[in-house]
Image (cartoon, rainbow, N blue to C red):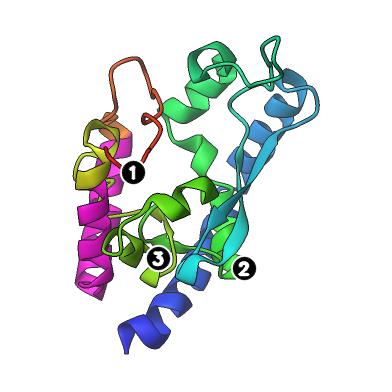
Amino acid sequence: MYTLFFKRFFDFVIALIGIVMLSPVLLVTTLILMFTNGGKPFFFQPRPGKKERVFKIIKFKSMNDKKDSDGELLPFEQRITATGKFIRKYSLDEIPQLFNVLKGDMSLIGPRPLLVKYLPLYSEEQSKRHDVRPGITGWAQINGRNTISWSQKFKLDVWYTQNVSFKTDIKIILLTIKKVVYKEDINSGENVNMPTFNGNN
């Protein structure tokens, strides 16, 4: 009953309340990023959701769009802005995803939505991470976040899809708040991105 009805109901209500309560933060951050990012405060990117249905995730834009001589985007470390480091440090870049939750693309709790290009690289077992809606935070995020390998992360994601419950979701929410406050389980080099998944790591 929880997964069929109440989880989506709670997602919608909590996301709506969250947007209202965090509206001052959303407004101020949007205005600051409009000035620092050349009028582009938001980042939109296709991500696979439940049953691999692709949607556009929305986050605050923490990196510029600078490219090398071949037209390829520069590495993460060379594109993240000073403001971007700050909003990532305190996970403010994740707040706009509450709108994805309202739309039904995402849940508050679930496996993090990754890049579309990774879809062909998953094993059959790893693909089960798409059996539920992706989340703003999840079981993997409170059990290592960016400090664990892709294979470990996927095992945790699949475990969650097979053990979804109200009790587990409450535990994840509480531990997520703790980790954000204390900035735990983040790679050295302040919020360095995970290495690219190539199907073997």
Of marks 3 and 2, which one's residue comes earlier in the chain?
2
Q: Quadrant of residue 43?
A: top right
Residue 195 rendering spot, x and y as whole percentages: 37, 29
Percent of width and height locating residue 69: 70, 9
Residue type at mark 2?
A: Lys
Quarter in which the N terminus is drawn: bottom left
Circle 2 Cα neighbour tier, 10 Å, few/some/many (<14 / 14–19 / ≥20): few
Earlier along the polypeptide chain: callout 1 or callout 2?
Answer: 2
Question: Around disc 3, counting alpha carbons within 10 Å, would you say few (fewer than 14), some (14 to 19), or many (20 or more)?
Answer: many
For the residues labelled 3 and 1, the Cα–Cα distance comes to 16 Å
Observer able to see residue 142: no
Kindly identify which residue carries mark 3: 130
Label 1 sits on a secondary structure element that is loop
The amino acid type found where label 1 is placed reads Gly
Quadrant into which the C terminus falls = top left
Query: Residue 167: x, y in percent?
Result: 20, 70
The residue under the point 45% across, 54% down is 120
Circle nearer the N terminus (3, 1): 3
Magenta span: 153-180
| Residue labelled with disc 2 | 103
Would you identify the image quadrant in which residue 127 lies?
A: bottom left
* 120 and 31: which is toward the camera: 120
Task: Pinpoint residue 196: horizontal percent, then vertical percent.
Answer: 41, 32
Decide: is 23 above or below 106.
above
- SS type, badge 2: helix
Q: Is residue 157 magenta?
A: yes
**Mark 1, residue position:** 199
Between the C-alphas of marks 3 and 2, the distance is 17 Å
